[in-house]
């Protein structure tokens, strides 16, 4: 039987396959070897870079890393606290509750200055986008009404808070507080508004307040000012600033980055300033103001002043300067245009004429030149000097008023009669006897040429002219004619109404020169006592009394007056058509209670213009206070 053929078995087939692979030709091997080898070598040589060429890249990379590291240190470590503070500032808002100022009262407890509720409106643009600013402005204008000034402040605001309104009424503040969510960057601070109920009547006395400026904020003081604080800028508000201002309260409020308030964190209460009681009697102040203003209107005068003192204490009972101004305008926020109108006015309403304006005193100064003659012994009370009507000095003629008016003379008269009749020639001759120096010295002894020391800012010192002063300022010597002018209160001599009142009070109280004060209850400060001879005091006092009776210069006005008075007239030439009208007097005589001095600028004779106002003052005082 034939064997059956099954073909190649598996391993046979495998063996056969191996033999086929082994039988590759040399040509095939060479081709296979050349297929991959030469190409890889070529690519390798193409992309191979020298290690030295990588050095700049490594350096740049290292430098960049170093810069980034240094910047990180700067931001995180060196200035980390600064940025943290700014971040906290965006999160926490400081609100100042401005302290109410102390109230001001008159001597009888009547309110002269107080506070009314008010708020300060602030815009803080920090971190706000343009759209948020526009949103705040639009909403604010819809609440307060259109205001070009407010829009301008919005546009000018940079990164610092700005005051939009310094005296926002309470009812408007409530609306803004309710709409706070739609007013990003808008803040409200409690900011009491100063109120002066008597307005022009007390303006020069009380003064006014204004918002603290950059100079105030930068002042080196124990309790620094904040933006928005009210600072006294004039009058008692300025001189008593340390007592009137209080201590602010502060509140920390959490806010979002968009300026929305989230809630309070910390709060301190504001402390009010001290109250002050002045020596002023407001009822008398009103009477003085009304009487002076009426007289000025009658004669067409543009400026005048009056001051009333307690002759035994130096307390100021009334102080009036006309024209005046409404100090409430400053408290509510005066515009630059309104302020410019006040400061540039020819009437000078901001000038306190009682203490800040000085004038030649005219014949009222004869109290001083008469004192110089008596104290130096040049004359005694009974010494008589003849009045010829005029005195010639070179080409100049110095006339007495009676000679100039009617060509009459007084004859032989003493110091008492000379004061009563205000005889110029008597004092011309007295000046020739004493010379100018004793008159100058006694003017200074009475406090002329320096401030009185009253608690009001802006006081004028006046001027007592001397040869040294004239050589320095005018480059001229002192001439004999100037001694004659000085003896009757003319020439370069200048005094304030308050200074003249001090001299009158000195004779009224028997020889004490007191520092005037505006504060009730102040201990009387006697600058000088017992510096005058009794004979001198008696002679001057009698001359002032004789002036108000019989044929004295104001006898026609005071002879029938129920209260005995004493006083001195003055008509001081000022280079204008009419002289300054003066009258200073005291009542009752001989035991004085009050001194009143009135001056009206370029109005005429003191006996006709100012003396009637003083009479009205005395009349009211003794009817209502004595």
Image (tube, rainbow, N blue to C red):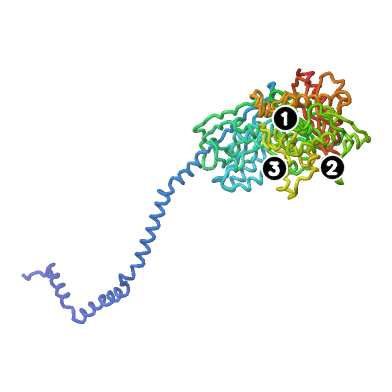
Dividing the picture into quadrants, the one containing residue 144 is top right
From mark 1 to mark 2, how far is it between C-alphas? 27 Å
User: What residue appears at the point 60 percent right and 29 percent down from the top-left corner?
Assistant: 273
Categorize mark 2 by other alpha carbons within 10 Å: few (<14), some (14-19), many (20+): few
From mark 2 to mark 3, how far is it between C-alphas? 47 Å
166 sits to left or right of 300: left
Residue 147 image offset from top left, x and y in percent: 69, 42
Tag 1 near tag 2, CB within 8 Å = no
From mark 3 to mark 1, how far is it between C-alphas? 51 Å
Categorize mark 3 by other alpha carbons within 10 Å: few (<14), some (14-19), many (20+): few
Q: Nearer the viewer, mark 2 or mark 3?
A: 2
Can residue 113 be spotted in the picture? no
Categorize mark 1 by other alpha carbons within 10 Å: few (<14), some (14-19), many (20+): many
Q: Residue furthest left?
A: 1
Q: Residue furthest right?
A: 406
The residue that disc 3 covers is: 147
Give SS at disc 1.
Answer: helix
Instruction: Give the position of the C terminus as an image quadrant.
Output: top right
The residue that disc 1 covers is: 502
Is 109 placed above or below 173 here? above
Residue 130 image offset from top left, x and y in percent: 59, 48
Residue 509 image offset from top left, x and y in percent: 72, 23
Earlier along the polypeptide chain: callout 3 or callout 1?
3
Tag 3 near tag 1, CB within 8 Å = no
> Between 187 and 542, which is closer to the camera in this rendering?
542
Give SS at disc 3.
Answer: loop
Is 545 placed above or below 191 here? above
111 sits to left or right of 417: left
User: What residue appears at the point 84 percent right and 18 percent down from the top-left corner?
Assistant: 562
Earlier along the polypeptide chain: callout 2 or callout 3?
3
Earlier along the polypeptide chain: callout 1 or callout 2?
1
């Amino acid at each position: 039987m034939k064997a059956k053929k099954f073909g190649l078995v598996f391993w046979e087939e495998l063996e056969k396959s191996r033999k086929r692979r082994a039988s590759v030709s040399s040509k095939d091997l060479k081709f296979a070897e050349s297929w991959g080898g030469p190409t890889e070598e070529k690519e390798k040589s193409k992309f191979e870079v020298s290690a030295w060429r990588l050095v700049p890249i490594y350096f740049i990379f290292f430098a960049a890393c170093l810069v980034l590291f240094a910047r990180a240190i700067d931001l995180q470590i060196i200035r980390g606290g600064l940025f943290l503070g700014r971040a906290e500032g965006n999160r926490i808002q400081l609100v100042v509750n401005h302290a109410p100022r102390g109230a001001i009262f008159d001597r009888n407890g009547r309110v002269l200055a107080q506070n009314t509720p008010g708020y300060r409106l602030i815009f803080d643009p920090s971190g706000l986008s343009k759209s948020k600013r526009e949103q705040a402005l639009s909403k604010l204008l819809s609440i307060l009404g259109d205001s070009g000034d407010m829009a301008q402040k919005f546009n000018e605001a940079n990164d610092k808070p700005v005051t939009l309104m310094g005296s926002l009424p309470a009812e408007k503040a409530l609306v803004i507080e309710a709409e706070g969510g739609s007013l990003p960057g808008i803040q409200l601070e409690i900011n009491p508004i100063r109120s002066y109920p008597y307005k022009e009547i007390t303006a020069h006395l009380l003064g006014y307040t204004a918002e603290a400026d950059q100079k105030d904020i930068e002042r080196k003081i124990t309790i620094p000012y904040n933006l928005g604080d009210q600072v006294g800028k004039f009058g008692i508000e300025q001189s008593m600033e340390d007592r009137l201002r209080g201590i602010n309260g502060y509140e920390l409020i959490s806010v979002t980055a968009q300026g929305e308030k989230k809630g309070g964190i910390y709060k301190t209460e504001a402390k009010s300033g001290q109250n002050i009681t002045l020596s002023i009697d407001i009822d008398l102040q009103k009477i003085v103001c009304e009487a002076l203003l009426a007289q000025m209107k009658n004669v067409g005068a543009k400026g005048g002043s009056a001051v009333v003192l307690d002759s035994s204490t130096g307390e100021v009972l009334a102080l009036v300067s006309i024209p005046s101004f409404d100090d409430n305008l400053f408290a509510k926020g005066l515009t630059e245009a309104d302020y410019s109108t006040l400061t540039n006015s020819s009437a000078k309403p901001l000038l306190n004429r009682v203490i800040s304006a000085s004038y030649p005193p005219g014949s009222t100064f004869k109290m001083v030149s008469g004192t110089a003659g008596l104290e130096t012994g040049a004359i005694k009370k009974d010494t008589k000097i003849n009045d010829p009507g005029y005195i010639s000095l070179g080409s100049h003629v110095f006339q007495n008023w009676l000679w100039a008016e009617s060509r009459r003379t007084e004859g032989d008269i003493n110091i008492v009669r000379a004061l009563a009749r205000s005889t110029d020639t008597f004092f011309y001759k007295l000046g020739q006897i004493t010379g100018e120096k004793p008159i100058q010295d006694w003017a200074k002894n009475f406090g002329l040429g320096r401030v009185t020391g009253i608690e009001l800012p802006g006081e004028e010192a006046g001027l007592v002219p001397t040869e040294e002063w004239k050589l320095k300022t005018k480059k001229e010597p002192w001439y004999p004619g100037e001694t004659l002018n000085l003896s009757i209160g003319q020439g370069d001599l200048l005094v304030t109404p308050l200074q003249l009142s001090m001299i009158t009070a000195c004779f009224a109280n028997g020889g004490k020169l007191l520092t005037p004060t505006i504060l009730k209850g102040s201990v009387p400060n006697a600058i000088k006592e017992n510096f005058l001879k009794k004979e001198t005091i008696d002679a001057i006092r009698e001359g002032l009394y004789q002036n108000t009776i019989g044929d004295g210069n104001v006898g026609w006005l005071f002879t029938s007056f129920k209260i005995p008075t004493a006083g001195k007239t003055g008509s001081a030439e000022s280079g204008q058509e009419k002289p300054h009208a003066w009258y200073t007097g005291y009542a009752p005589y001989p035991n004085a209670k009050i001194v009143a001095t009135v001056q009206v600028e370029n109005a005429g004779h003191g006996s006709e213009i100012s003396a009637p106002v003083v009479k009205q003052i005395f009349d009211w005082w003794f009817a209502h206070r004595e």
